[in-house]
Image: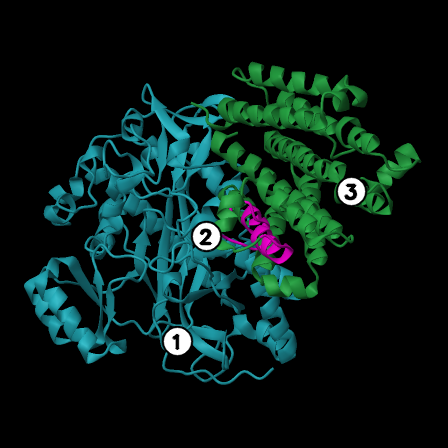
Amino acid sequence: MAVSLMSTAFYNEMYDSDAGLRPHYRAFAEWLAGMPADRLERKRAEADTAFHRVGITFAVYGEEAGTERLIPFDIIPRIIPAAEWTQLEAGLRQRVQALNAFLHDIYHEQAILKAGCIPSEQVLNNAQFRREMIGVDVPSGIYAHIAGVDIVRAGAGESYVLEDNLRVPSGVSYMIEDRKMMMRLFPELFSRHLIAPVQHYPDLLLDNLRTVAPGVANPTVVLLTPGAYNSAYFEHTFLAQQMGIELVEGRDLFVRDETVFMRTTQGPQRVDVIYRRLDDDFLDPLAFNKDSMLGVPGLLSAYRAGHVTLANAIGTGVADDKSVYPYVPEMIRFYLGEEPKLNNVPTWMLRKPEDLRYVLAHLSELVVKEVHGAGGYGMLVGPASSRAEIEEFRARIIAAPEKYIAQPTLALSNCPTFVDSGIAPRHLDLRPFVLSGKRGVGMVPGGLTRVALRAGSLVVNSSQGGGTKDTWVLEN
Amino acid sequence: MLSRTADHLYWLARYTERAENLARLLDVSYQMSLVPQSLAAQNENWRAILALNSLESAFAATHSGVNVDNVLRFMVADATNPSSIYSCLRAARENAHAVRGTLTAEMWESINATWIELRQQTFEQILARGISEFFDWVKLRSAVTRGVTFGTMLKDDALHFIRLGGLLERGDNTARILDMQYHILRQSDDEGASDFYRWGALLRSLSAFQVYRKVYRDAITPARVAELLILRMDLPRSLHACADGIVRMLQLIANDASAETQRQAGVLHARLHFARIDDVLAGGLHEYLTDFMDRIYELGDGISRDFLIAA
């Protein structure tokens, strides 16, 4: 089938600026050119049916309760050459190591603050800084066992870290299901390419979680979910099943003598590691949000006593906060004595008067984000906004500048994608899932590629109409 | 296994089985309504179906009169009627959704596909294709779900709770269907050919018609029908077979708190195992079946207390 030439205003993952194919897409493009359009269309329909039937959906907030939606899956993969991934992986290891060192430091000696590398008030007055964690020792000093680091490519193709998600990053189930779907739809592609496998992620995760158990021989690991109405519930069930561990809700657990138990048909059973997909605020109604029906009363006391491991730890949010993000390169230099291998996006902090002045004068060019926002909610994409939207946002910024940061609008790279009008370029990002445990940092090659399906849109979040692609890291 | 997980599995199985048996009951009632009879007698049958589920007042609140169309619509497709086939399949799917990680992929897909297909058809479309075809579809989907359950689930507690829920529901439902139809059939004075069709329809609704022929090789008599559906250990939907399965499942999942529930199940089983049909009929079949259903209810209570709402 014919593929129209791509816009060259952005870095295109498949074509270089002379409209030539990039070498790592050559075999795929040949295959695509030989595919009749109707066969592709049938395959796309088959994928939709299968995803529906398997129930790979996510719940959408703000719509009718219990609304489930498919995350659109695109059959054109995002391909990453081996050499490029090797660099990315090294950068990710370095970054997550530094972030874990930072978290340990600020809940203990606070050396980085004393050295003046980061303004103390940025950390200590941050709503995500959990005083309850000061002096608490966690197994192997690991706080962010699972990090979902969002990486984008811009300009001439250089990579930037957009955010470090260190609380309860989601999306890894789509990475695995997308791969399964591609193998089911187009098995022939997998004999034409050497593609690094990703389906062993759950084994890696379980192994990782077991290494951080509180000193027991055969630890019981569980996954704690907020419940069936959470947007990522599919993923919670998927991971629990793949790892062969219990999927528990708060009401399934209770704490006795600072020890966590689950209620089973054979009586109480001790729990050693909780992979929790529940935010800090809801974990323990005795310690945090009193109205939480989702948590476990007394969990914090068991945790502080060292009788149970939480992954991720409590209080990781202070390290992925957008107001702390600009200091990550400093963390890498401070803890590892290395230069950062991955770029940070230049960031204006609007609590600084000179930054605020600049940003207010350039709103139509910039992206402005809430410091504590997530999921693509509460942000302004200047170039894509109307004058009225910009003015409304300006008023919100002026009312509380410390709540916002701003970044240049990155010319996110794009990749050919199936849309209603045929194949067209759409912007994308990449979220690798980085695992940290007693034996160090590890990850499966690639991650989740999210793609903005609306023409020109730079927002890839699934809650905002984003889709996903299978992500191939080629092996040499 | 988690008590909450066991609870969802147990109810998933109960609702799936309930939907199937409701399809069986409605199908036999519909078949019987085709046998020539007075309109009053016919509507009496449909009224009995509502009474069986204690739904008379809920029905009266939304419908003007008891007739075949109204009752079928209410019992098949009414989302506000918690006992309709629609509601049972929805509840089965909701319970499955809550524990889908515990189910095999095939099992979840089967239950989810049933729900998706059900939602795609309106009651008018169901009628247009023929209501019996719809009942066959419900039975078939139930059979598919049961098939992938047995064919793919590990034989551990998860499967045991699923089987326990299914057996408890099936025993109750067989007793209900038999109680209602037996009552209606005994009332009719007409001892002629139409009775043959009615008894035949009852047996067919419980997939027992051919079995009856095979076992008795003789004319259909009410006493033998009762014996087959109550006492025959080898008929999978009989009360005896259900009680036997319940006892075995309870042995497999037994815990420190469950001795009394196991004892009660043992008593129920013994009463079926050593019973003779003449004695059952002499004491009154209706009384016997009512007692059975009460005991099943008690067992359900005990199972809930011992396993599903653990401390």
Work out whether residue A233 or residue B172 is closer to the camera in this orientation and state it.
B172
Q: CA distance from mark 1 to mark 2?
A: 25 Å
What is the magenta range?
Answer: B66-89
Chain for colour cyan: A
* Residue occupied by mark 1: A11
Q: Is residue B287 above or below residue A30?
A: above
Q: Quadrant of residue B234?
A: top right
Q: Is residue A452 above or below residue B2?
A: below
**Given the image, what chain letter belongs to the residue carrying mark 3?**
B
* Residue A163 percent location from the top left of the image: 30, 57
What colour has chain B? Answer: green
Do the CB atoms of the residues marked 1 and 3 lie less than 8 Å apart? no
Q: Secondary structure at mark 3?
A: loop
Q: Does label 2 lie on the same chain as label 1?
A: yes
Q: CA distance from mark 2 to mark 3?
A: 47 Å
* Residue B60 percent location from the top left of the image: 50, 50
Q: Amino acid at mark 2?
A: Val
Circle nearer the N terminus (1, 2): 1
* Residue A140 percent location from the top left of the image: 35, 33
Work out whether residue A376 or residue B209 is closer to the camera in this orientation and state it.
B209
Work out whether residue B1 or residue B285 is closer to the camera in this orientation and state it.
B285
Image disc number at residue B89:
none
Check disc 1: other Cα within 10 Å, few if <14, some if 14-19, many if 20+. many
* Residue occupied by mark 3: B207
Q: In the image, what residue occupies the spot 57% across and 55% down?
A: B77
Give yes or no for residue B83 being in the magenta stretch.
yes
**Given the image, what chain letter belongs to the residue carrying mark 1?**
A
* Residue occupied by mark 2: A172
Q: Secondary structure at mark 2?
A: helix
Whether residue A438 sits left or right of residue B172 in the image: it is left
